[in-house]
Amino acid sequence: MFDVVVIGSGPAGMSAALYLKRAGKNVLVIEKEYEGTGQVAKSICVENYLGLPSVVGEELGESFRQHVLSQQVPFLMDEVTEMRPENGWKVILASGQCIAAKAVVYAAGAVPKRLGIQGEEEFQGKGVSYCAYCDGSLFKKKDTAVIGGGDTALSDALYLSGICRKVYLIHRRREFRSTISIEKIQEKENIEIITEANVQRIMGQRKVEKILLDDGRELPVGGVFVAIGSNPETDLIKSYVKKSSDGYVIAEEDGVTEMPGLFAAGDIRKKQLRQIVTAVSDGANAAVSAIQYLNNCS
C-alpha cells in the first residue's frame, strides 16, 4: 500500500512526486514510456523557464527526473489500464499487477492533435511545433504559419506577430470558432489570414522551408505552428471527474476533484496556459492537497 501513486512522469507528475517524498510520503511514479519525461522532451529549446535562459527540452526533462530519483522515488514502467476506488485506490497495470494506494495524483498529460499530412512528423522539432509560447522565440523575424481556427490558433497568431516578420493564419473554414475578436487579428499588418484552405504538405531539406496549400499555392515559411487542439489523456478517470466540453478535467489550482483521494495535475486540467511552469506548479499544488487529504484521513 503506497500513500500516493503518481500517474505520469512529465513535469507535473515529477513535481508532485518530489513534494510528496519530501513530505515523508511513500510514493510511486508510474510511467508509460521508458524514462519518459512528457512533452518537454520534444521541445527544441526552452527559453521561458525561470532561471534557465536557454535549455534543450530533453535535457530539462532529464534534470527533473534525476532530481526526483535523487530522493529515492521509485519509478515503475508500465501502462495503467484501469483505476478503481477500493479501500483507497486500486491501479491495474497492463502487466497484470495491481497497485494499492491511499490517493492518486493523475498527471497523464495531453497529446496535441496532428494534421496527419506529409512532412509533419518528419519536421517535428525542425520547424513544426505545437506550442507557440514554447518555441515562438526561435522564429524571431522569420515567416511562420499558424494552422487552426479556434482560440489557441488566434492567440498564437497574435503572440507570434510580435516576434515574427510575418504570420500566415490558415483555417480550413470561412468563419473562425474563436472568442478572440477577429478584428484584433486584422489590425496586425504582419498577419495574413487565409481561409477555406488546407495545408497539404510541409516541405524542406533539413528543416521547414515552405508549405503547400490545397489550391496549389506554396508559402515560404520557417516555422509551422499546429493549433488544432489537444486530446487530454482522461479516459481512465472519466467516470470520477467532471470534464469540460473539450475533455479537460475541471479542477481548481489545488487539483482537487469530486472523487476523494483523486487529484488532477498538468495538461489534463482545464486552464488558460499549458506550459512547463504551470505543469510544475500544478504538480506541487496537487501534492500538497494529497498530503492534506492523507493527514486528515489518518
Image (tube, rainbow, N blue to C red):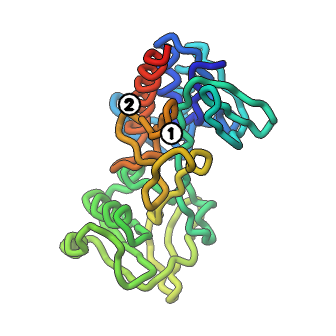
Q: Which residue is drawn at 20% across and 75% down?
A: 183
Where residue 298 sits: x, y (%)?
A: 50, 13
Give the structural element (helix, strand or loop) at label 1. Answer: helix
**CB within 8 Å, label 2 to label 1:** no
Q: Residue at x 71, y 40 (%)?
A: 79
Q: Where is 88 relative to 130, above or below?
A: above
Where residue 48 sits: x, y (%)?
A: 35, 40
Q: Residues within 10 Å of mark 2 (few under 14, many from 20)?
A: few
Instruction: Give the side of residue 239 with respect to residue 161, left or right.
Output: right
Instruction: Give the side of residue 174 with respect to residue 32, left or right.
Output: left
Q: Where is 235 relative to 153, above or below?
A: above
Q: Which residue is drawn at 53% across and 52% down?
A: 232
Instruction: Give the side of residue 36 with respect to residue 261, left or right.
Output: right
As measured in the structure, the alpha-carbon distance from the residue carrying label 2 to the one carrying label 1 is 11 Å
Sequence-wise, the earlier of marks 2 and 1 is: 2
Q: Residue at x 51, y 77 (%)?
A: 199
Give the structural element (helix, strand or loop) at label 2. Answer: loop
- Mark number displayed over residue 57: 1
Residue 60 visible (yes or no): no
Q: Quadrant of residue 33?
A: top right
Q: In which quarter of the image is residue 122?
A: bottom right
Q: What residue did someone put label 2 on?
A: 52
Give the residue at the far top of this rendering.
24
Q: Nearer the viewer, residue 291 or 186?
A: 291
Query: Looking at the rendering, in which quadrant would you find the N terminus?
Result: top right
Q: What amino acid type is highlighted by mark number 2? A: Leu
Q: Residues within 10 Å of mark 1 (few under 14, many from 20)?
A: many
Q: What amino acid type is highlighted by mark number 1? A: Gly
Where residue 293 sits: x, y (%)?
A: 45, 23
Where residue 255 sits: x, y (%)?
A: 42, 36
